[in-house]
Image (cartoon, rainbow, N blue to C red):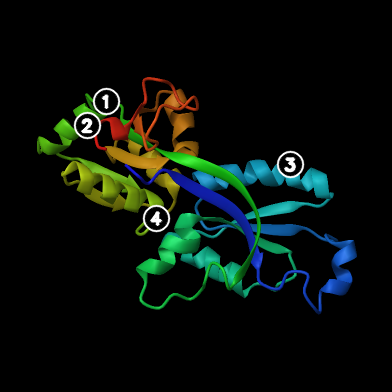
Amino acid sequence: MKLKLIVTALLTATGFCAAPYAAAADSFPSRPIRVLVPNGAGSSVDTLTRIVTNNLGSVIGQHVVVDNRAGAGGIIGMEIAKDALPDGYTMIAATTAASTIARLLVKKPTYHPVNDYESVVQFAETLNVLVVANNLPIKTVPEFIAYAKSGKTPFNMASAGVGSQSHLSGAYFMQQAKFQSLHVPYKGGGASSASVVAGESQWSLIPSGAAMTHVAAKRMRAIGHSLNRETKLLDSSIRPIAETIP
């Protein structure tokens, strides 16, 4: 599996601190800053962004407000950020899924990740984790694939929405492992994770930030991850998917 990392970065509309705003740059920030999250509450990018903004606010001496604008695989949030006044008071925590992948899935993209935004900082990289509902008799990736090919139903894959990285990662996994599963898109990673916890969906391939709190609480089971090697970030029992599917 080669869909390894989801990069999260803060972007602002092109023109930040350019004329006519350069004169006010010395007093920046003089009011609260809004950070858009193009995903739902409880998603991995939402969680990571709130950790960063909580600390950022104390450093810059201003409130930093997180504004969730989920939808269309991140396109809605990206468009709002693009159209915002380029004064640095509106930023977006953009993953590769929202900034790059989502726009490639529509005929007429409305934004460009390089031309329409200024990159401020990359603040996270996360790996994907293969999770299953607790009521499934699956503890390893080979067992998962065997179960998937057995034809037992229901066997639904939850994602954070059509065109989201969890959707594309899951579709790629199905293609490589040669099995099929019904795709059930939700509005954000928090909702898709909750569906696996509730047993409404049987599995998902999601960022570790959205998964591991549930896994630690034994609300769902993690059985594999997307790196091609072991990682100290996860328990050693959670094996690389690449050990089964190169």
x, y percentage for residue 79? 54, 70
Q: Amino acid at mark 4?
A: Ser
Q: Residue at x 61, y 68 (%)?
A: 117
| Residue underneath mark 3 | 55
Residue 140's tag is 1
| Residue underneath mark 2 | 144
Q: Amino acid at mark 3?
A: Asn
Q: Residue at x 41, y 43 (%)?
A: 4
How many angstroms separate mark 2 from mark 3 (CA)? 40 Å
Q: Amino acid at mark 1?
A: Thr
How many angstroms separate mark 1 from mark 4 (CA)? 25 Å
Picture quadrant where residue 128 is located: top left
- Between discs 1 and 4, the one toward the N terminus: 1
How many angstroms separate mark 4 from mark 2 (CA)? 22 Å
- Callout 1 touching callout 4 (CB < 8 Å): no
Mark 1 lies on a secondary structure that is loop
Categorize mark 1 by other alpha carbons within 10 Å: few (<14), some (14-19), many (20+).
some
| Residue underneath mark 4 | 164
Q: Which residue is at the far left?
A: 151
Can residue 174 be seen here? The reply is yes
x, y percentage for residue 121? 66, 53
Categorize mark 2 by other alpha carbons within 10 Å: few (<14), some (14-19), many (20+).
many
Mark 3 lies on a secondary structure that is helix
- Between discs 4 and 3, the one toward the N terminus: 3
Q: Amino acid at mark 2?
A: Phe
